[in-house]
Amino acid sequence: MFYAVSAPKICISYPKTFHLRQKHAASTRLSVRAASPNYDNGDKVEYTPWLIVGLGNPGNKYYGTRHNVGFEMIDQIARAEGCIGQVPILLAKPQSYMNFSGESVGPLAAHYQVPLRHILLIYDDMSLPNGVLRLQPKGGHGYHNGVKSVMDHLDGSRDFPRLCIGIGNPPGTMDMKAFLLQKFSSTERTQIDGALEQGVGAVRTLVLTGFSQSIKRFNLGQKYKFHKV
């Protein structure tokens, strides 16, 4: 079952929002949902939590823009999944703006003692065609400022999984920032909506089986899904 979490001083209760209040309180604000594990016969089982973070910018101004598909993926997972097996899941949307995402992700991962291999970062990727997804066990920041911030706050590590959502490249000489903050065309929107639905299944598979052959097949299918035979 998904429920909201609140931790004003790293103490958990159950209102609607999650806030980590440190020296720079505004930069560590989060929007978080969590999935509680189910236990058979009331017995607690061993499990390792997952922290699934979508990158984006808060506020209606950025809703539906290319740079906010990470937020959209988190919303899609929250709507579609009640829980994923016995695994506890934290779904987070940092409210500290894209370029400072790490200021939220680092403390949250530390508080819940989530290992790097279970921190899944979801974000937009201009190197992939619009609507194409790719799951990777690790990687660099690819000049993505949000990813760079997260890496900086995870002691410079690049060894955490990521789900990249393709948004394509700016057409012609269009400014990159303007492109990222622009909303999708109707055709692009259809492709993104389909990708978000496919992403839910991919995340479920990753959480339950890790980077298995199923993930390799998923990546291959995504790579060629818009290729006409």
Image (cartoon, rainbow, N blue to C red):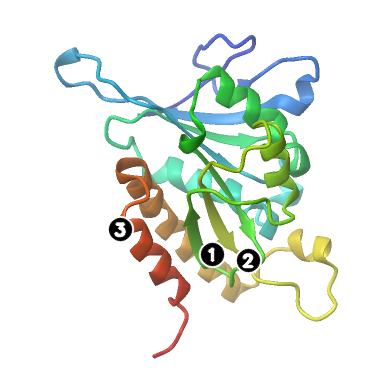
Image position of 122 (left or right of 205): right
Q: Nearer the viewer, mark 1 or mark 2?
A: 2
Query: Dots 1 and 2: beta carbons under 8 Å?
Result: yes
Where residue 192 is drawn, which disc sits there? 1
Earlier residue among tags 1 and 2? 2
Residue 32 appears in which quarter of the rendering? top right
Q: Nearer the viewer, mark 3 or mark 2?
A: 3
Residue picked out by circle 2: 167
State the residue in front, 116 or 54. Answer: 116
Q: CA distance from mark 3 to mark 2?
A: 26 Å
What residue sits right under mark 3 in the picture?
Answer: 213
Give the structural element (helix, strand or loop) at label 2: loop
Q: Nearer the viewer, residue 12 or 157?
A: 157
Q: Is residue 155 above or below residue 44?
A: below
Question: Could you tell me which residue is drawn at 56 percent across and 18 percent down?
Answer: 111
For badge 3, the amino acid type reads: Gln
Name the amino acid type tagged 2: Ile
- Estimate the x, y position of residue 86 in percent, counting from the top left: 28, 30
Give the residue furthest to the bottom: 229
Q: Position of residue 189 (x, y in %)?
A: 57, 67
* x 59%, y 68%: residue: 128
- CA neighbours of label 1 inside 10 A, class few (<14), some (14 to 19), many (20+): many
Chain-order first, disc 3 or disc 2 = 2
Residue 227 position within the rendered picture, expressed as x and y whole percent measured from the top left: 46, 84
Q: Amino acid at mark 1?
A: Ile
When asked about the image quadrant of residue 40, the answer is: top left
Q: Secondary structure beneath disc 3?
A: helix
In-image side of 27 versus 41 (left or right): right
